[in-house]
Image (tube, grey):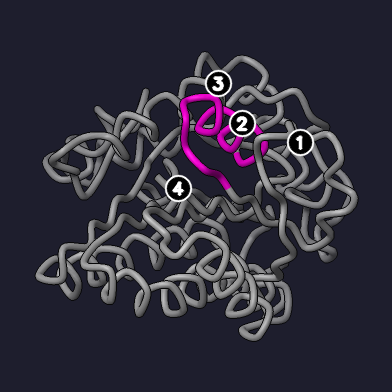
Amino acid sequence: MVVLVTGASGGLGCVLGPSLATRGMTVYGTARKPDVAAGIDAPVRMLAMDVTDSDSVAACIREVHEREGRIDAVINCVNQMIIGSLAETTPEEMRALYDVNVFGVQRVCRHVLPILREQGGGTIVNMSSLGGLLAVPYMGAYTSAKFALEAMSEALYHEVKADGINVVIMQPVAMHMDRPATGAHLHVVAGAAPGSRSHAMLERMTRDTAASKLTPEMVSEKIHAVLTAKKKPLRVPMDKAKGLSVLKRLAPQALIDRLIAGLLPD
């Protein structure tokens, strides 16, 4: 099985790529600067891709196809997060987030679909999160992008299932990762004042992530199971997302409000 993992130089991607490769899959990973991803295990073949650049996306997918003759699965792991109230967040900051988390995924899907259709099938895995189920205050830009990703993925699922193409939405909660709490993947918006609730939300997220029982290794195992399963589900909720997906559909708004209140920083 030939697998392309976008965003393979950090976060989930840098664990997922080697995990799939050691199970016998031919794995290509992407990074904006693959030469700086020297720490990625050798079984993963790193290529350049900037998901905000359609030409870059097309060139990378074309190179994998030319090398292998097929692409069986694409896993979209590229992800960025900003924290801030919608009043503090500029349209430019929100647009940049969407360009990676929504339009970046759409570019990858758009360019790989002709290959999947021509070969008669394949699988697209898009990484959502708990934020795709629940709109969290001070994370409005991020959670709205995940809502959009969920809707886009579900629409795509219906559009391509007759072509033998599977679309799967993974819904993990925050994973415990051995990396800085903040950095290129996560930051508070520029307009958030020191000591604001946005900064408090970042601190809350840092604590919750450190305490999380879900690891990238566990998510990688689940993705491997999905890729090798004969019948693939549209959504795969993990950890707290399992109960929340049911609760969101059935619970009254008052209960949802109390749940949201429990997520807010002190």
Q: In front of the other: label 1 or label 3? A: 1
Give the mark nearest the N terminus, 4 or 1.
Answer: 1
Count every numbered label the image shows and give the total.
4
Q: Residue 230 magenta-drawn?
A: no
- Check whether the beta carbons of the residues at disc 1 and disc 3 lie within 8 A of each other: no
Q: Is residue 239 above or below residue 245?
A: above
Residue at horizontal 45%, vertical 65%? 69
Res 110 quadrant in image: bottom left
As drawn, the label of residue 97 is none
Q: Secondary structure at mark 1?
A: loop
- The amino acid marked with disc number 3 is Thr
Amino acid at pointer 4: Gly
The span from disc 1 to disc 3 (Cα, nearest Å) is 18 Å
Mark 4 or 1: in front is: 1
Q: State the residue at coordinates (54%, 21%).
A: 217
Q: Label 4, on which residue?
A: 131
The correct choice, above or below, for 154 with respect to 22 in the image is below
Judged left or right of residue 134, residue 44 is right
Residue 40 is marked as 1
* First of labels 3, 2 by sequence position: 2
